[in-house]
Amino acid sequence: MTSLTIDNVSLSFGGVRAVQNLSFDVKAGEVFAIIGPNGAGKTSVFNIITRVFAPSSGRILVDGQDITAVSRHRIVGYGIARTFQNIELFEGATVLENLMLGRHRFAHAGFVHELLGSRKTRRFAAEARAKVEDVIELLELAPHRNSPVAGLPYGVRKVVELARALTTEPKLLLLDEPASGLNPEETHDLAFWIDDIRSDLGITVLMVEHDMSLVSEVADRVLCMNQGQQLALGTATHVQSDPAVVAAYLGT
Amino acid sequence: MMDGQIAQILQLALNGAAIGSIYALVALGLVMTYKATEVLNFAHGDLLMASAFIGWGLITFAGMPFWLAVLLTVIIAAIVGYLLDAYVLRIIVGQPQFAGVMLTIALAFMIRGGVSMAFGPTSRTYPTPWDGKTTKIGSVVITDLNLVIVAAALIVTALLFVFLRRTALGTAVQAASQNQLAAYLCGIKVKTLNSLVWAIAGGIAAICGLLLAPIALVDIGLWFVVLKALAALVLGGFGSMPGAIVGGLTIGMIEQFAGVYLPDGFKDVMAYLVLIVVLVIWPRGLMAEAHGRRV
Amino acid sequence: MRFHYDTSYLDQSRLLRYPRDKLLYGALFGVLALIPFLLPRYYVGEITYLFILSIASLGLMVLTGFTGQVSLGHAAFVAIGAYAHTYLLTLGVPFAVSAFGACSLAALIGFCIGLPAIRVSGLYLAMVTLAFSIVVEHVLGRWTSVTGGYSGLTVPSPVIFGVNLGGLVPFYFLCLTFLAVTVLLLHNLLSDRTGRAFIGVRDSEAAASGLGIWTAGYKVLAFVVSAFVMGLAGVLMAHKVQYLTPEGFGLIQSMEFVLMVVIGGLGSLRGAIFGAVLIGLLPTAISKLKPMLPSVVSGQFGLETFLFGLILALFVLFEPGGINARWIKLKALLQTFPLYRKDTYKRGRTYMKSERYR
C-alpha cells in the first residue's frame, strides 16, 4: 500500500498553465478518482507523476520520498505503474510479449548470458513467465495469449494495457480513462477488477475518469479539476452535488 | 592587399549565393511536399535529374527553342509530381512516416534506373542563351548563368510567397498542411491540394534541374544535390520555408569559403558536416517548429 | 497458426522445439554443407557472397527492424570493419585478433553515433546517418596512408592457426560458420529481455520508459550490437573482394542494406536473410535474363536500379511486412489447409495521423 502526495505542483507549457498550484493526498489503499472537463490538466498530473514532464514548481512524494527529480525509467522502481489514455501497447508484439516486458525491472541474467542462451537465462525467463501467467489468469486473457496485439478488439487491448501495468508489481496504479470506449458490461467488469486490485493485491489506485457511474461505484474520494486547479475534493456523492462542479462539468 | 582580399571575399560570396540559390530552391520544393503530406521526398533529386534529361532531349533531339523546352519540361515535371501523389503516395496514407520514406526512396531508384536505361551513362550538355557570358560588377566577375540562377530563385520564391499568402488557393494549401481534419471540415479538398503542392514542387525541381545542368552537366549524378538540400533544410529548420532559403544560401556560402580557406577535400563534405553538427547540437534544427507527442 | 504443446515454462526458450523444426533445419544445413561439392565454382562464390550480405542484413535488422532506429548509412560500418581489418592484417596481427579488433572499432564508432541518436529520432536520424555515410566514404578516399585512397587496398588471405582459408571452399565454410553463429547469438539476444526491450523502444518509448526500460541506453546498445555485426560483415567482405575501394561502401550500398531489411520484413531475423538473398541474387538474375530482353533496355546498371526500386515500391505498397510476412501467410496456408481464409491477416483501415501534432 502506498500513499501519494502532490504538493503545490504547477506545470506550464509556454503560456498555457496546465496545472496551477495543485495539492492533494492519496491515502494508502484507497481508490482516488480525478474528474473534470477536457483540458483541465488531469492527464498532465499523470504525466508529472510519471516524469514525462517536469513540474515548473512543487513536489511529488511517494510514501514520503521525493520523486520529483527521478528519471523516467526509474519511476517504476518506486512501485508506480500507469496505463495510457490512447492505448500505448507495443503493436509489433504479441500479448504475452507485451506482458513479459512488464517484468523488465526484475532480476535478470546479464547481457552475456542472454547472448549465449544459457540455462540461467532460461530459468529467469521461466520465472518471469510464471508471474505473467498469474496476471493473465486474473484478467482472463488466456485465449489471447499468443495473439498479436494489433488485431485485437479495443476492449481486450484495454485489458492488456491494464495487465501490463500489473505485471510490474506496482503499489500505486495510475489509470488514465480506463473505461473510455468500453460498453456498460465491460465497465462493470472493470469496476470489479479495480476493487479486486485494491483489496486482493493491495494496490492504491489513482484514476482519471469521465464515466461517473464507474466513479461512484468504485472511488473512495474524488477530486474535480478545472483549468488546472482544484475545484472540489471529497467523496463521490459530495463532489457530484457540489454546485461549482455541476456548473463547470456535470451539468444538471 | 586589402582590396584584393575584399574582392576575393565578394567573389566567393557571390558564387556561394548562386550555388546556394539552387540549394535553396531544391530545399524549398522538399519543404513544400513535407509540410503538405509529411513525406520527405527522397525522389526530389531524381525528378530534378530527370527534368534535366527531358530538357536536353527537347532542346537537342527535338530541336525546340530554349524557352519553349523549359516551359514544357516544367509542365511535364509538374504533371509527374501530381500523378505521384495522387496515385502512388495516396495508397500509403495512414502508415507511419517510415513507409513514406521507403516509398520515395523506391521511386528515386526507379526514376534513376529508368533514366539510366533510356539515356545511357554519358554526360551531356545543352546550349543556353547565356553560355560563356559574364558580367562585371566593380572588380567582381559573375557568370551570366549565376545571375540567371539567382534571378530565377528570387522570382520563384516571390511567386510562391504571393501564391501562398495572397491567394485563396494558397491559403487553403497552408490550412491543409497545418491541420488536415479541420481543412476537410472547412470544405477544402485536401487530397487535390496536396497533389497540387506536389505538382508545384515538381515544377520547382524541373527549374532547378534545368539551371543546374549547365554547371554539373546533364548526368545521373545530378540527383546528389538533394542531399545538400537536406543539409540546407536541417540548418534552416525543418518545417520552415524561409528556413529552407536561408539554409540553402548559407550552405552555398560555407562551401565556397571552405574551398578556399580550409584544407583540400573539406569543400565536398562541408554540407554534410554541417548537417551532422547541427543535428547533434540542436536536434530540432535552428528555426524549427515545435515537435511533441501527447500521451 | 502454430499450436504450442509446451509442458513447462522452460520450453518457451528452447531453440528448436519441435521434431519438424529440427528436421528441416538439419536438412537445410546438410544441403548448405554439400553445396561446395555439388555446384560449380561460380555458384559457390555467389553463395558465399550471399552469406556475407546476410550477416550485414542481420546487423541492420537489429537496429532498424527491432529497435526502430532508421539508418541510411550503415555501409559505413561495413567499410570500417573491412578497412580496419585489412590494415591490422598488413601490420601482421593474427586473423582472429584483427577481426575482433575491427569489429570492436566499428562497435565503438557505432557507440559514438548512437549517442546523438538518443535525442535525434526518425527522419533526422535517417539524415544524420546518411551524412555520416558520405563523410566516411570521403574520409576513406582521402586517408591514403591507411586506406590507399581511391586507388584501392589489397587484402591478404585469411589465415587462422596457420591454415589458409582463402580458397573458395574453405572460405565458403568460414562464412557459413560466422553466419550460423551470428544468427544463433542474435536469436538468443532478441528472443529474450534485451530483444523485447528493443521492440519496446521501437513501438512506444513512452510506455517503455514507464516499464523501466532505459530507452536511451537501449538505443545505444542497438547501435553498438548492429555496428559490431556490420563490422564482421566488413571483415568477411574484405576477404571476398580481395581489393578494397571506397566506392564499394558508399551511399548506394547503405541504401541496398536498407532495401534488404525492408523487403525482407522488419522485425524478423529470417526476413533479414530473405532480403539479403533477394537483393544479392538480383544482379545475377538480371544478367542471366538480359539476352532475352529487348535492346531498348540498354545499360544493365539502370535496369538493376530500376528493379530494386520497383520491388521495394511493390512491397511497401502491398506487403509492408516484407517477404517474411508472405512466408508466414504461406506457412499458415499450408498448416491450416483447406480451412485457410484469405482475410486471416487482413488489418483494418488506418487513417492519417500527423506525426507532428499529436
Image: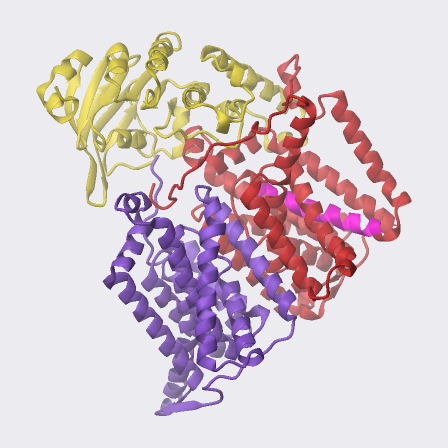
Residue A26 occupies which quadrant of the picture? top left
Chain letter of the yellow region: A
What residue is drawn where x is 45% and y is 86%? B130
Vertical placement of residue B168 versus A82, above or below:
below
- Residue C309: x %, y % from top left: 60, 54
Vertical placement of residue B95 versus B288, above or below:
above
Chain letter of the red region: C
Chain letter of the purple region: B
Which residue of the protein is positioned furthest toward the left in this rendering?
A: A243
Vertical placement of residue B125 versus C229, above or below:
below
Left or right, C64 with respect to A15, comes to right
Left or right, B279 with respect to C318, comes to left
C55 magenta-colored: yes
Foreground of the two, B238 or A6: B238
Foreground of the two, C348 or A224: C348
- Residue B245: x %, y % from top left: 36, 67
What residue is drawn where x is 35% and y is 71%? B156
What residue is drawn where x is 49% and y is 22%? A99
Whether residue C101 appears in this view of the structure is no
Foreground of the two, C217 or B127: B127
Whether residue A24 appears in this view of the structure is yes
- Residue B282: x %, y % from top left: 38, 55
A52 magenta-colored: no
Q: Magenta segment range? A: C43-63
| Quarter of the image with the N terminus of chain C in it | top right
- Residue C217: x %, y % from top left: 49, 39
What residue is drawn where x is 40% and y is 28%? A87
Examine the residues drawn in magenta and state their main secondary structure: helix
